[in-house]
């Protein structure tokens, strides 16, 4: 299998965690933002990543979107299970996965790129990196007001996750689910921001545990 990705994308990290959890061998191809559309449109009709290419007879040519990749991998390799046995619990896991995807993953992106353009500029002060960061900020409309809203959303999300991860260890049910993998991936960029590491050490301990379980290298900053 081949995973088309941006190396720094937390949504691509989400797909890698699922592949690792399923113990599926795969390779990655890192695309260049902007130019990636030339490769992806003919494959999926979209320009979003990640995209998984099964590269096997009888399998789809390409699967776009991390949620669809989750669903495909559960059919392709049912064990170990990523879906919960209870329909009610699995529905809750999907609802959390969607909330994390659509709201919290976006909030993380805003806060992360605002940090990288300011106090975290020294992480990679190269011209290429800083130009790319400015392009991303313009593309997504990352303004001071938007960052403030994103910070508020993250604090609410972390408070909610704290109730689940620090009491029952799993976000839903009694084992790992799509919700746990999604949270571990989409919050991982915050590891480079000192205030989050200092204020929520339990969060990064859990993120590290999930990465280790999936055989995925730890995120930068951890």
Image: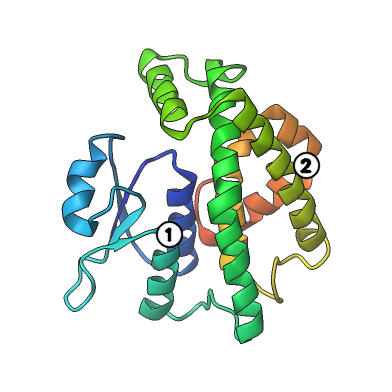
Quadrant of res 177: bottom right
Relative placement, left or right, of 137 versus 92 is left
On screen, residue 36 above or below 122: below
Residue 164: % across, % down: 77, 62
Q: Residues within 10 Å of mark 1 (few under 14, many from 20)?
A: many
**Which quadrant is the N terminus positioned in?**
bottom left
Q: Residue 222: tell me if it is visible.
A: no
Query: Please, is residue 134 above or below residue 220 in the view?
Result: above
N-terminal of the pair, mark 1 or mark 2, is: 1
Q: Position of residue 27 (x, y in %)?
A: 30, 54
Local crowd size for mark 2, using a 10 Å CA cut-off: few (<14), some (14–19), many (≥20): some
Q: Is residue 74 above or below residue 141?
A: below
Mark 2, residue position: 200
Q: Nearer the viewer, residue 216 or 135?
A: 135
Q: Secondary structure at mark 1?
A: helix
> Residue 23 in the image: x percent, y percent?
43, 67
- Label 1 belongs to which residue? 66
Element carrying mark 2: loop
Task: Give the total of numbered labels.
Answer: 2
**Residue sitting at x 56%, y 58%:** 182
**Would residue 43 appear left or right of 176 to someone viewing this image?**
left
| Residue occupying image coordinates x 19% and y 46% | 39
- Between the residue at mark 1 and the residue at mark 2, the CA separation in whole angstroms equals 26 Å
* Residue drawn at 60 percent across, 41 percent down: 107
């Amino acid at each position: 299998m081949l995973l088309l990705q941006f190396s720094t994308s937390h949504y691509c990290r989400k797909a890698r965690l699922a592949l690792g959890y399923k113990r599926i061998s795969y390779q990655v191809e890192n695309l260049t933002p902007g130019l990636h559309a030339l490769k992806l449109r003919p494959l999926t009709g979209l320009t979003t990543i990640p995209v998984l290419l099964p590269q096997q007879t009888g399998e789809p040519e390409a699967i776009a979107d991390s949620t669809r990749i989750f669903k495909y991998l559960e059919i392709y390799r049912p064990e170990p299970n990523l879906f919960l046995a209870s329909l009610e619990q699995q529905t809750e896991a999907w609802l959390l996965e969607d909330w994390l995807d659509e709201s919290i993953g976006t909030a993380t992106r805003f806060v992360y790129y605002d940090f990288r353009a300011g106090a975290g500029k020294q992480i990679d002060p190269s011209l290429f990196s800083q130009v790319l960061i400015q392009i991303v900020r313009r593309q997504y409309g990352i303004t001071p007001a938007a960052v403030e809203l994103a910070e508020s959303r993250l604090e609410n999300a972390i408070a909610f996750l704290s109730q689940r991860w620090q009491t029952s260890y799993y976000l839903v049910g009694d084992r790992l689910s799509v919700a746990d993998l999604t949270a571990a991936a989409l919050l991982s960029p915050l590891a480079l921001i000192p205030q989050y590491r200092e204020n929520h050490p339990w969060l990064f301990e859990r993120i590290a545990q999930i990465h280790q379980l999936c055989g995925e290298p730890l995120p930068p900053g951890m």
